[in-house]
Image (cartoon, rainbow, N blue to C red):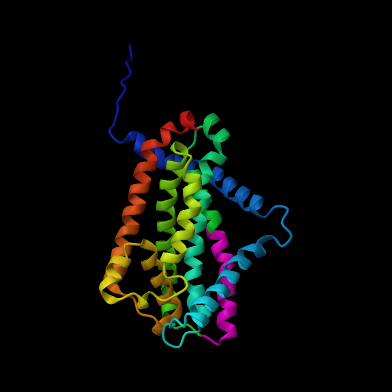
Amino acid sequence: MHTRELIIKAGRTESQYWKDLWKYRELFYFLAWRDILVRYKQTIIGMAWALLRPFLTMIVFSIVFGQLAKLPSEGSTPYPILVYAAMLPWQFFSGALTECSNSLISNANLLSKVYFPRLIIPTSAVIVSFVDFMISGIILLGLMAWYNFVPDWRILTLPLFIAIAFAASMGAGLWLAALTVEYRDFRYVVPFIVQFGLYISPVGFSSKIVPEQWRLLYSLNPMVGVIDGFRWAILGSESQIYVPGFALSLALVAVLLWSGILYFRKVERTFADVI
């Protein structure tokens, strides 16, 4: 008579979860593509909104900070390019926060009826913001052509800083996605965070205007390092990275992503009941 043994291995469920992410990759593609289509459905100018929003913000910031406040640029860099080099990662980050915070609630029916790794939903929301980011990059190319601005070899490092921006967006997005399910107040908190963060991050000005004794403290905002990295890659020798502050921001991004994944995994089994 044959007997069967049930062997329970430590970490089996955890490893299976990450395999399931690959197994359900088609659902990830579907959700991302659906959200992209819904975003621009029945709009007159379609994806041009992804160009118009950062372009108008760049014009306002260039006038307010560059012309009225007379804040310095970095080297001889035209002020609109200085602003737009920061606007790209900020728009990506703020868009990801907004999309992720509502992503689980928007898919409540799916969460309560079908099993799949819940991590797929906020990740697909970040991808939607990344598509906007890629489209918005067209304006940067146009500005460079208009001002005859030619980047140097540092532009080759831009994918590295894009990856850091992606990690920051993903980490913060996972936290907000999970917290919004439990506490619906976060739907009202997120717009405030995005608006407040725009002004305390060096988007409309160079971080070099921050006094030296405060720069490390200022870098506790993870987006400071991300934005400075983008400017360093795009502006070339005109921009310099404050290394201690960048290292601090990079460490905070890593902690944000790691803790975001841990917290999301910890509470995701309750989503179907709470939502």
Toward the front, the furthest residue is: 68
Question: Of 9 and 43, which appears nearest the observer?
Answer: 43
Q: Residue at x 51, y 79 (%)?
A: 81
**Residue 243, quarter of the rendered image:** bottom left
Please provide percent x and percent y for residue 263. 36, 42
Answer with left or right where residue 131 lies relative to residue 197: right
Q: Residue at x 29, y 31 (%)?
A: 9
Highlighted range, magenta = 130-149
Q: Is residue 204 magenta?
A: no
Answer with left or right where residue 55 lies relative to residue 158: right
- The image quadrant where one finds the N terminus is top left
Question: Of 189 and 267, which appears nearest the observer?
Answer: 189
Above or below for 73 versus 32: below
Please provide percent x and percent y for residue 51. 62, 67
Numbered label tally: 0
**Residue 226, quarter of the rendered image:** bottom left
Question: Of 238 and 19, which appears nearest the observer?
Answer: 238
Q: Is residue 141 magenta?
A: yes
Please provide percent x and percent y for residue 235. 44, 80
Whether residue 10 is visible here, answered yes or no, is yes
Q: Main secondary structure of the magenta part?
A: helix
Question: Of 9 and 192, which appears nearest the observer?
Answer: 192
Please provide percent x and percent y for residue 166. 44, 59
Above or below for 245 versus 196: below
Whether residue 119 is visible here, answered yes or no, is no
